[in-house]
Each structure stands twice: as structure tokens, then as C-alpha cells.
Amino acid sequence: MIETVGLTRAYDGLRAVDELTLGVPKGSVFGFLGRNGAGKTTTVKMLSTVLRPTSGTATVGGFDVWKEALKVRSIIGVIGEGTELARPFWTPMEYLRFFSRLQGGSDRNDRADLKDWLARLGLTAHAARPIGGFSSGMRKRLELCRVFSRHPEVLLLDEPTKELDIPGKREIWELLRKLATQEEVTLFLCTHDAAEIQAVCNRIAILRRGKLSFEGTKDELPQSVIRIEVESPDATCARLEEASLAVSSSVAGSFVYAAFRDRKEPEAVRSELASVGISCRDVQEVDAFDERVLAFL
């Protein structure tokens, strides 16, 4: 449903997205994970036709995101970090009808559909309230009403729960899982939150400094990830790469997270590192999903 080949976007010679090649199957809930500044938002802007690629290609539903931008826009919905309230004194229905008319909808035919979506997302009881008084979670529900009422084939979400508390995040995650199944929509979820990926997605890609470092199912992540405490984490990462000891490694504070293709005991890793001149303060195996993905971030 989404395909990129060598997709690149550069700013003043600096590549924010660098030769990105990935495929998102139709009907999947695809997680796009990376640290802040990794290039996630730039990728979403290219896929949503807002930003022109410097080189490479990207298609959504078979349409080129730049050459056939209008066709792409007709089949996608987009939700960003925050909900923009066009008029805070509007009611939910006024808000939804405004965007429906902007997108060429028929007011007579859309009114019943919009009421149905307000009911499905639990906003009927708040239909007469000004949306300026809505909580962050209610605003996010309203945004979901706006995009799903257009019946998109693809939904691009850029940090959709960033401003929500933990209960609010879980509420939106459950809604996304349910709506993706009921509406048969392909979801492309861009986030830096590993818990969000684990809760919602069935396939993931990890972006590191603009480059793809992993793509596959959650179960395909290496099971053996070791947390290594060392004096010089950056130098240790470089040495691991030079010696080809790990599939991938990354720094978080004073720790290095290293992923290995085959399961390894911590002491075996300590010995291998010592053989290439790396002295470790501590070596521990990690099992948590958020720590396993750290090796690729």
C-alpha cells in the first residue's frame, strides 16, 4: 500500500531521510519508530505530499506522492502531533462539517455519517459543547472522527498521542486497533514511543539518523540484546561495528545496547569485547521490548 525506493530528503546538503526503502502491506498497522530528529516527520510529510523528495520515489496506493499528489490526497487521512481547532467555539458537528465541505463533501449526505462517527467515538454526549473546552483525549477522538469519516484507505499518524497521559494513550491505541480492523485501513504510525509500537502495530521499521536500521515484525527483532555499561559508549559502538560483533548497537546514556543474531550469554559478550580491547563495567541481557529496540535507535 505504501512503497518507498531510495527515498531521500536533504536540507542544505544534510540528509534528513537517506535512501529509505520500505514496503507497507495493505491492511497492516505499521509502526515507524525513531528518536527525535531521526527523520520520521520528514518521511510523513513526503508521504502526505506536503514535502517534495530530493531523490528516490514513494507511492501510496500505487500513486506517486509528487507526480500524482491529488490522487494520493484523495485516499489518505493525516493526524499530526496536536489538534488544530479551527474555531474553539464551534461544536463537534460544526467542526466536522467545516472540514467535510472543504474536502468536497455534501452537507445533506454527510450529516448522518458524521453523527454516526461522533457516536462511535463516544462524543455524542458532548455534541453541544464548544470544542475549545475539550480535553486532549477528546480532541484526539474528534480528529479520528474527522479522518475516518472520509473513509481513507491509508491513515498517516505523526506522534498521535504525544500530548496525552497514559490512560489517554491507551484509549487511543484501543480505538486505532479497532478502527483499523473495522474500516480495513492501512495505518502508518510514526512515533518515538516503543510502548505505542508494541501496543498497536504488527509490523515495524526503525529509523536511525535518516537511515533504515530495521524492518520486519516485532517477533523478528533479535531476541539477544545486551546492555553494556562502559566508560566510552560512543567509542564502544564504533568498535562493535568495526569488529562486526553485533547486528546493531546504539548509545543511551552510559550504556550501549547491542543486538546479536544468535543468543549470547552476558559473560560470553564480555569476553568477546575484552578480546577487541573493550573493558565493561557491567553486562546484562535485556528482555523488555523497549530496550530491545534501543539497539536499533
Image (spheres, grey):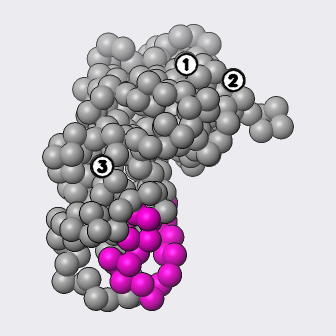
Which amino acid type corresponds to the residue marked 3 in the rendered image? His
Tell me the number on the disc at residue 151.
Answer: 3
Q: Is residue 100 magenta?
A: yes
Which amino acid type corresponds to the residue marked 2 in the rendered image? Ser
Label 2 sits on a secondary structure element that is strand
Residue 187 point in image, percent of width and height: 34, 41
Q: Earlier in the sequence, mark 2 or mark 1?
A: 1
Above or below: residue 165 compared with residue 232: below
Label 2: which residue?
55
Residue 184 point in image, percent of width and height: 22, 40
Above or below: residue 250 compared with residue 152: above
Above or below: residue 84 compared with residue 45: below
Q: CA distance from mark 1 to mark 3?
A: 27 Å
Label 1 sits on a secondary structure element that is strand
Q: What are the residue bounds of the magenta stretch?
A: 81-101
Using residue 16 as the reference point, say whether residue 111 is left or right of it: left
Which class describes the residues within 10 Å of circle 3: few (<14), some (14-19), or many (20+)? some
Q: CA distance from mark 2 to mark 1?
A: 9 Å
Q: Residue at x 40, y 41 (%)?
A: 75
Q: CA distance from mark 2 to mark 3?
A: 31 Å
Q: Nearer the viewer, residue 275 or 16?
A: 16
Q: Earlier in the sequence, mark 1 or mark 3?
A: 1
Number of numbered callouts drawn: 3
Whether pointer 2 and pointer 3 mark residues with C-beta atoms closer than 8 Å, the reply is no
Q: Nearer the viewer, residue 68 or 48?
A: 68
Q: Residue at x 65, y 27 (%)?
A: 8
Q: Quadrant of the N terminus?
A: top left
Name the image quarter holding residue 6.
top right
